[in-house]
Image (cartoon, rainbow, N blue to C red):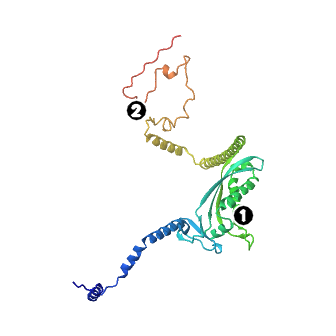
C-alpha cells in the first residue's frame, strides 16, 4: 500500500483552508493584563500605601473660623501675603500648612503682686483677643504659633503688676478697677503691636486685637479684707446720713412755703368772712355728712342760728355742768333726761318715760 507524504498533505490542506483573521485590540489588552496581573496588583498596592501615608501631608482642611499660613521648604519660606481660607487644600508633601484660630478667644491667669502699701495679693486676670486675618503671616514669621505663651500672657502679667503697684488695696473695691483695666489693655496693645523688623525697626503692625482685660477676682488676707469692707460700709452710711439731712432740709423748706401760703390765704379771706358765708359753709358740710354711706344721726336746728347741733350753738353752751350738793347733775335730779328726737322734735315712739331718781341717803 502506497501512502502520500505528510508534507504534501499539509500543503494541500493549507491551500484549501480560509485565511486567518487578525486579533482585536480588546483581546490584546486583556491578554496583556492577564499576563502581568501579579505585577500590576503589587504596583497598585504600593501606590495606595503611598497615598495613605502622604494624604495627611498633602490634603489639608482648614476648619470654620480659621486661616492657614503656608511655609515652603525649598522656596521663600513663610508666605506672608497669601493665606488659605476655610475648606480643603492640596499642598506638596515637603511644605507645611499652619492653621490659626481667628475667632474670639479667652485666656485667664493668676498674677501675684504687691500693692502700693506693701500688701501682697493674688489677682485673677482674664483677657479676650482675636487675630487679624491679613497679618497672620507676619505673626507666624515673627512670633510663631505659641504667641500666647511667648508674647501676650507675659506682657499682660507684667503690666498688671506695674499698674497695681501704684494703687492701694482698697482702691480695688472702688470704681478705680475699670480705670486700671483700661490702662493695662492700652499698654499691652501698644507693646504687642510693636514688632521688630530687620528692615524697619519698631514697625507698627497690628498682629492681634486685644478686646479687654478683666480683673475677675482679688484674694486679700482675711483681716485686710474685713477692714476694707468695714470702711466702705461706714462710708456708705455717711453718705446715707448726708442724703437724709438733705431730704429734711427740703421738707423744712416745703413746710415754710406751705405756712406762708396759708398765712397769705388767711390775710386775703379774713376781710370777706361774714356770718352768712360761714352759715352757707355749714349747710354744705351738713349735706355732705348726710350723703355719706356710713350710719349717722344729724340733729338740725340746735341753736338760735339754726345750724346743726355739731356746728352751731357753741357760743351759748355752758362750759361746765352744774351739780348740786349731792354731786349729781341738776337735770338728772329733777328726773329729766334727754332722749333722741324724731323728725318732729318729739321723743321717739316706744321710749319709756324715766322715773325721777330717789334722793341719796345720808
Q: Residues within 10 Å of mark 2 (few under 14, many from 20)?
A: few
The vertical placement of 246 against 66, above or below, is above
Q: Label 2, label 1: how many angstroms apart (C-alpha)?
A: 102 Å
Report x, y in % for residue 154: 70, 57
Mark 2 or 1: in front is: 1
The vertical placement of 111 against 104, above or below, is above
Q: Is residue 13 left or right of residue 76?
A: left
Quarter that holds the N terminus:
bottom left
Q: Is residue 302 left or right of residue 79?
A: left
Quadrant in which residue 188 is drawn: bottom right
Residue found farthest to the top: 362
Query: Secondary structure under badge 2?
Result: loop
Q: Is 112 in front, or is 228? A: 112
Query: Secondary structure under badge 1?
Result: helix
Residue 61 appears in the figure: no
Q: Is 172 in front, or is 292? A: 172
Q: Which residue is mark 2?
A: 342
Report x, y in % for residue 31: 38, 76
Q: Are marks 2 and 1 in contact (CB under 8 Å)?
A: no
The residue positioned 48% from the left and 70% from the top of the image is 43
The vertical placement of 238 against 317, above or below, is below
The residue positioned 51% from the left and 13% from the top of the image is 360
Report x, y in % for residue 214: 65, 55
Disc ID at residue 39: none
Q: Which residue is mark 1?
A: 191
Residue found farthest to the bottom: 15
Report x, y in % for residue 232: 70, 45
Which numbered disc, 2 or 1, marks the residue that appears first in the sequence?
1
The vertical placement of 311 against 356, above or below, is below
The residue positioned 48% from the left and 42% from the top of the image is 283
Q: Is 191 in front, or is 221? A: 191
Q: Is 8 in front, or is 197? A: 8
Amino acid at each position: 500500500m502506497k501512502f502520500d507524504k505528510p508534507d504534501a498533505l499539509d500543503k494541500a490542506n493549507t491551500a484549501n483552508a480560509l485565511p486567518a483573521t487578525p486579533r482585536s485590540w480588546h483581546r490584546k489588552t486583556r491578554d496583556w493584563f492577564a499576563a502581568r496581573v501579579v505585577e500590576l496588583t503589587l504596583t497598585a498596592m504600593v501606590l495606595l500605601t503611598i497615598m495613605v501615608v502622604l494624604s495627611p501631608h498633602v490634603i489639608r482642611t482648614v476648619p470654620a473660623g480659621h486661616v492657614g499660613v503656608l511655609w515652603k521648604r525649598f522656596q521663600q519660606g513663610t508666605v506672608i501675603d497669601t493665606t488659605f481660607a476655610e475648606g480643603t487644600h492640596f499642598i506638596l508633601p515637603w511644605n507645611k500648612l499652619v492653621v490659626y484660630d481667628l475667632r474670639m478667644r479667652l485666656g485667664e491667669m493668676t498674677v501675684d503682686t504687691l500693692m502700693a502699701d506693701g500688701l501682697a495679693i493674688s489677682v485673677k486676670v482674664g483677657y479676650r483677643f482675636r487675630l487679624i486675618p491679613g497679618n497672620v503671616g507676619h505673626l507666624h514669621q515673627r512670633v510663631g504659633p505659641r504667641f500666647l505663651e511667648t508674647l501676650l500672657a507675659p506682657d499682660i502679667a507684667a503690666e498688671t503688676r506695674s499698674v497695681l503697684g501704684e494703687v492701694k488695696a482698697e482702691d480695688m473695691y472702688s470704681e478705680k478697677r475699670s480705670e486700671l483695666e483700661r490702662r493695662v489693655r492700652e499698654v499691652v496693645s501698644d507693646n504687642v503691636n510693636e514688632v521688630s523688623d530687620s528692615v524697619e525697626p519698631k514697625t507698627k503692625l497690628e498682629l492681634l486685637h486685644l478686646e479687654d482685660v478683666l480683673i475677675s477676682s482679688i484674694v486679700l488676707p482675711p483681716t485686710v479684707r474685713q477692714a476694707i469692707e468695714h470702711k466702705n460700709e461706714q462710708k456708705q452710711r455717711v453718705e446715707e446720713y448726708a442724703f437724709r439731712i438733705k431730704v429734711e432740709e427740703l421738707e423744712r423748706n416745703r413746710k415754710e412755703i406751705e405756712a406762708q401760703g396759708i398765712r397769705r390765704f388767711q390775710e386775703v379771706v379774713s376781710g370777706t368772712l361774714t356770718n352768712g358765708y360761714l352759715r352757707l359753709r355749714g349747710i354744705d358740710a351738713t349735706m355732705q355728712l348726710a350723703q355719706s354711706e356710713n350710719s349717722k344721726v344729724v340733729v338740725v336746728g340746735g341753736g338760735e342760728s339754726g345750724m346743726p347741733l355739731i356746728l352751731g350753738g357753741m357760743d351759748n353752751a355752758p362750759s361746765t355742768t352744774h351739780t348740786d350738793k349731792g354731786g349729781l347733775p341738776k337735770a338728772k335730779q329733777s328726773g329729766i333726761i334727754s332722749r333722741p328726737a324724731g323728725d318732729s322734735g318729739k321723743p321717739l315712739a316706744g321710749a319709756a318715760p324715766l322715773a325721777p331718781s330717789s334722793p341719796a341717803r345720808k
